[in-house]
Image (cartoon, coloured by chain):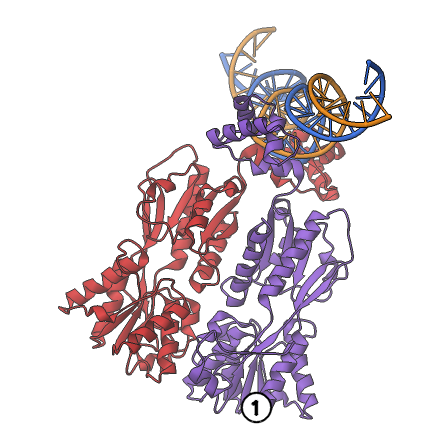
Chain colours: A purple, B red, C blue, D orange
Amino acid sequence: MAATMHDVAKLAGVSIKTVSNVVNGYPYIRESTRARVLAAIEELDYQVNVAARNLRTGRTGIIALAVPELSLPYFAELADSVIQAADAQGLTVLIEQTGGQRERELEVLSGARRHLTDGLIFSPLALGPGDEDLLEVDFPMVILGERIFHSSVDHVTMHNVEAARAATRYLLELGRRRIAVVGVHPGEVVGSAGLRLKGYRQAMADAGLEVDESLLGEAGLWHRATGAQSMARLLDAGVRPDAVFALNDAMALGVLHELQVRGVRIPEEVAVIGFDAVDEGSYSNPSLTTVDPGREQIARTAVEMLAERVAGKGAPHEARRVYADFSIVVRGSTQADAAAHGRPGLAEGVRTA
Amino acid sequence: MAATMHDVAKLAGVSIKTVSNVVNGYPYIRESTRARVLAAIEELDYQVNVAARNLRTGRTGIIALAVPELSLPYFAELADSVIQAADAQGLTVLIEQTGGQRERELEVLSGARRHLTDGLIFSPLALGPGDEDLLEVDFPMVILGERIFHSSVDHVTMHNVEAARAATRYLLELGRRRIAVVGVHPGEVVGSAGLRLKGYRQAMADAGLEVDESLLGEAGLWHRATGAQSMARLLDAGVRPDAVFALNDAMALGVLHELQVRGVRIPEEVAVIGFDAVDEGSYSNPSLTTVDPGREQIARTAVEMLAERVAGKGAPHEARRVYADFSIVVRGSTQADAAAHGRPGLAEGVRTA
DNA sequence: CGGCAACTCTACATCGTTGTAGAACACACC
DNA sequence: GGTGTGTTCTACAACGATGTAGAGTTGCCG
């Protein structure tokens, strides 16, 4: 079996606590003692038993990340960023997939697994207004996104309204007027769908244009498939937009697909913009103009805030709400020349915030 | 603070061990006692402290999954499948990203984190022949992929050679003769690159064709960008293929992009096939013909094998090697009509194994 | 040279759970 | 009535680390 501190202590001829002190960098240890202990550790190939340390200290060094689905590129890339940020803080990440199901999101909040982790970064999809009380948990948590807010919990989110407004304004500046929206959640006010649609409406109003409600395509889940279906329904209903604002990139890629299956030329006949700036969009055909919501910044900020909460457990300072910077990345789906010379990944971003 | 078994025991008027027995479903408990304990648990909102249980039992209920990068769709979808399979077994998944760096892969194998987990599902990229000894670890492990084999470790992998051979044969049956390969690792024999290239060579030989080495494009990392670059280099060198076999989907998507930027018509002038069957490929333009390597089956099998190893810790049975079934999914990048009516996700697969 | 501070190290209790061993009782069997 | 079997429950010692408290030792200061 694996060696314990006891074995090391015996071999080095010191007390078990001294081994502990060496391992944890306690300063008052004679150099010769430290060397002896380290040698014993080396010889026995000793590694601390994290479970025991956890029990004693109440810390695990693991944080949980709860997202709907890893197979959605946005969340995969978010997870990637979170893991890297956590690594930088010496933390490991345990991932839970909720599938966007309410029941599973509740489980995450009350979950038996919270003992395994020091804290939670949570990107809810099913919880919403009315569920604020559920966020009153007794462990460190950072919420991502905008489905739900609670004054006592840290939030990291994006400028949804402003970014969507900028995206719409950008399409308007290209001379587009009949701008369809794909991914609308009717009646929603606070989620990404509601906020981004709000930004769209603002930009239209800014330009003195009426919103033609028949241009708004619904889509519950924001997948490639639902984007394509939503676009198909709009076209089948006789709607003829000259631009599409898909509320995320996955749907935008579905839209691109659907339009091209029907022989619609992009961007000449219809310009398409997405939201998220997933890597996939720089290699689609045409490449996808999109809004970069500052995913890395979101991940890094969330991890840092969580780490702070974990460390300063006793001092419950004010909850914070952080907004990441966004920018618009112009590519071939809105500007033909961007496609021509647009070496993927090198496309210049239009900094807007 | 959170309630402990002690608190529950006191409230229910039983010994702490009885509480433990109730929690763990020990049968010999009077119904009335069980009810009293459950009521106390309910009242105190008690949850077992997993850290303490871990320390006592030596099990954590967590398995680690080590992959190169989650932002690569194949690994994101693999992680998705693994998490779901683990969930079905009551296990949680902790993800480590190695970035394909040797150093980090070594860390995973010897890592301090192994105390946190019951076992490891490992998809190496940097380790290779000569590193077999490193796989002699004293914790349960399942290796994915084909970079490295060791007789004492369980492996779950795919029929790389046969699948690549089938993919190439499929292109040949379409009448293509100058089939380029993108993603070659010169000199490699055992990794995915080596094996898939081997399948390609076999299919060419089967058809009595010589392999034109100038058709083989190198690409170290299998990303969208490297696929596009590799394709660009081939074209710039004056190579004129009538088909491309990209050794994975990410590169295939880069290839599609590069070809279209140059105005090459797909599939008329050049047919493209990938490998992995990531969701993204069904929505590209054109949609991507690909090899489905049986990712879900791989994930499920790996988790089940690992769970078995974890459970039967004492009995080191023979290491197994499992190959998942594969199939070819035909879409628009090789058959124009598949694109026309090819509603994404509904494309028919050609079952080949 | 007494007293105090700074080192260096140790013994012991403790974190919250589960395994072991066995007590106590009831019931059946011969 | 002794023996055995089954049921129900408890006391206590682990698991492997860290926190607390304090025992020695040294060196310096006045």
Residue A187 visible to an observer of this rendering: no
Q: Quadrant of residue B335?
A: bottom left
B239 sits to left or right of D28: left
Q: Position of residue A136 (x, y in %)?
A: 74, 55
Residue at horizontal 57 percent and vertical 62 percent from the top: A68
| Viewport quadrant of the C terminus of chain B | bottom left
Q: Secondary structure at mark 1?
A: loop
Q: Quadrant of residue A20?
A: top right
The chain letter for the residue carrying disc 1 is A
A224 sits to left or right of A162: left
Vertical position of residue B304 compared to residue A353: above or below: above
A114 sits to left or right of B289: right
Disc 1 residue type? Leu
User: Toward the viewer: A310 or B171?
Assistant: A310
Q: Position of residue B342 (x, y in %)?
A: 38, 78
Q: Position of residue A207 (x, y in %)?
A: 67, 91
Residue A153 visible to an observer of this rendering: yes
User: Toward the viewer: A351 or B15?
Assistant: A351
User: Toward the viewer: B343 or B134?
Assistant: B134
Q: Which residue is mark 1?
A: A174
How packed is label 1: few (under 14 Cα within 10 Å), some, or many (20 or more)?
few
D8 sits to left or right of B343: right
Q: Position of residue A1 (x, y in %)?
A: 47, 29
User: Toward the viewer: B263 or A15?
Assistant: A15
Count the marks.
1
Residue at horizontal 65 percent and vertical 56 percent from the top: A304
| Viewport quadrant of the N terminus of chain B | top right
Residue at horizontal 46 percent and vertical 59 percent from the top: B69
Name the outermost residue toward the left. Answer: B208
Vertical position of residue B194 compared to residue B120: above or below: below
